[in-house]
Image (cartoon, grey):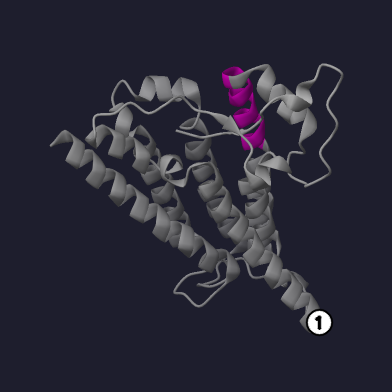
Amino acid sequence: MGGITSVLYGVLAYLLFLGTFLYAIVFVGNLPAPKTIDSGEVGPIVTALVINTFLLGLFALQHSVMARPAFKLWWTRFVPHPVERATYVLLASLALVLLYWQWRPMPEPIWSVTNPAGVMLLQAVFWIGWAVVLISTFLINHFELFGLRQVYARLRDRVLPAPVFRTPFFYKRVRHPIYLGFLLAFWATPSMTAGHLLFAIATTGYILIGIYLEERDLIGLFGDQYRRYREQVAMLIPLPRRKAGVDGSADTQSAELTRR
């Protein structure tokens, strides 16, 4: 019964994630929906700035702190290990739901592209960004990343293998294609408002901090293997792969951590 309950819990958390992920596309892209980044009742700009900054900070805090190994070690004293990732996904999704619900529009225009070719280009980059995010999750392990593999292993009474280090497809060119996809999606808009700009700047800052923390964890886990990968592959911009030094590190099998 414990295994079945864990699976049901993991599936519920995953479905909530899937809904919030799809709504993020609608929200950021100002697609037809009850609430988007630029729709809703407009209030005082200072109030909107304070509330929106708090919502973004709350999500960043939850998303970063709960992902750290030290927190996981403490957290799994109370939360069963097989559902730890699903719980993280659930709480992250709820933080996003709160952001969508309470976000205050700040419609003051920052830039507006009216040229049809420019509009089409920015919209194409927007969709490419989301596609890169989704594809990248499957390149590592989509179902482990969002907690389903862990609860299924609990159901089958199996132990998951240790994380492996590999560089499938996008990961051969950039170390963090998921973050790259988010940046493309958040910044590529023909109509940038003050609220959208706040969202883009805040999430960019969070992503850069997140990369620093994540790479510190990866070095702690994989040591010199990840250090060599970091020396050879760009962080976000897909530049040509840098040549390895004389130590022969080019022959090392590098990869992205398959996250628990």
- Drawn side of residue 18 relative to residue 165, left or right: left
- Image quarter in which the C terminus is found: top left
**Along the viewing direction, whichever of 85 and 204 lies nearer the viewer:** 85
Tell me the amino acid under the disc marked 1. Answer: Asn
Q: Is residue 171 magenta?
A: no
Q: Which residues are magenta?
A: 209-221
Q: Position of residue 222 (x, y in %)?
A: 60, 20
Q: Residues within 10 Å of mark 1 (few under 14, many from 20)?
A: few
Q: Is residue 189 visible?
A: no
For this orientation, the residue located farthest to the left is 1
**Along the viewing direction, whichever of 53 and 199 lies nearer the viewer:** 199
Q: Position of residue 173 (x, y in %)?
A: 74, 43
Q: Position of residue 167 (x, y in %)?
A: 64, 38
- Drawn side of residue 98 relative to residue 164, left or right: left
Q: Is residue 159 visible?
A: yes
- Image quarter in which the N terminus is found: top left
- Drawn side of residue 12 relative to residue 228, left or right: left
Name the quadrant containing residue 98: bottom left
Q: Is residue 212 magenta?
A: yes
- Drawn side of residue 132 relative to residue 77, left or right: right
Q: Which residue is mark 1?
A: 115
**Along the viewing direction, whichever of 243 and 13 lies nearer the viewer:** 243
* Relative vertical location of residue 36 with respect to residue 184 in this rendering, above or below: below
Q: Secondary structure at mark 1?
A: loop
Q: Give the number of marks.
A: 1
Give the main secondary structure of the magenta stretch: helix
Residue drawn 23% across and 46% down?
8
Name the quadrant containing residue 132: bottom right
Name the quadrant containing residue 16: bottom left
Q: Position of residue 159 (x, y in %)?
A: 33, 26
